[in-house]
Amino acid sequence: MRSTCCRLLFLFAIGVSLFAQGTRGYYRYPTIHGDEIVFTSEGDLWRVGTNGGQASRLTTHPGEESMAAFSPDGSMVAFSATYEGPREVYTMPATGGLPVRRTYDGANAVVVGWTPDGKILYSTSRYAPLPGNMQLLTIDKDNHQGRVPLSRAEQGVYAPGGRTLFFTRFQKQSSSTKRYQGGTAENIWKITGDSEAVPLTANYAGTSKNAMVWKDRVYFLCDRDGVMNLW
């Protein structure tokens, strides 16, 4: 998946590292593998070590690249880009190189991460049964698509082994209202194999999102104490 720790922590680490060098910027959507981080800044992808230092630019296209995710072996990076109009999924070597287009959805294709067995996991509205809905799909090395058997899902992360998926059904609440508790608030769900999906954070009416699995625990973002924090 995107990583085994929460992106919020990665973003904080990048900001602290570069700020300590006297460099200010807007660093977003980090992904980590080993001691390497790839992130978005100035609409391009950059790579830097976890100890900081000089970041190297991986892309220079006028289109925007974002939502990068290391493959499980760290050799490839999947990301979303607007090279040819719609946002589509691309891959490239983690050290840089020519991007390869992986989707032709003509919709908002957003990289979510990878499955443990090396498939790209992404969300798209291309096959959704209703307008505004998002679904999770996978792409294998031969570019064959597979639908995750959920009628509606936008974010997701697989536990090691690939049978259990933690996901959110709704997209980000578009108004970005703080402490939102309306009908489209994101909630963390869990599904294992062919069983029915069950909500894990239904005890709170607000937002719970961006689930990550690390050391047999699920970490996620939630504003149940008034501001968005890591839980």
Image (spheres, rainbow, N blue to C red):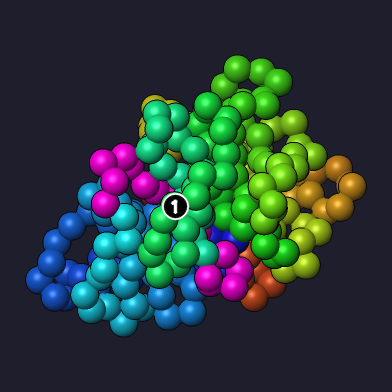
139 or 134, which lies in front? 139
- Please report the residue visible at 18 percent of the width from the left and 57 percent of the height from the top: 25
Q: Secondary structure at mark 1?
A: loop
Residue 156 in the image: above or below residue 185? below
Horizontal side of 153 relative to 111 (left or right) equals right
Q: Can residue 157 be seen from the camera position used here?
A: no
Q: Nearer the viewer, residue 101 or 125?
A: 101
Give coordinates of residue 184: x percent, y percent: 56, 28
Q: Looking at the image, which residue sits at the far front? A: 98
**What crowding class fits label 1: few (fewer than 14 Cα within 10 Å), some (14-19), or many (20 or more)?**
some
Find out whether residue 145 is within the magenta segment.
Answer: no
Q: In screen coordinates, is 171 left or right of 189? A: left
Q: Which residues are magenta?
A: 60-75
Please determine whether, in this image, residue 93 is positioned above or below residue 152: below
Residue hosting label 1: 99
Q: As rendered, which of 152 and 43 lies closer to the eye?
A: 43
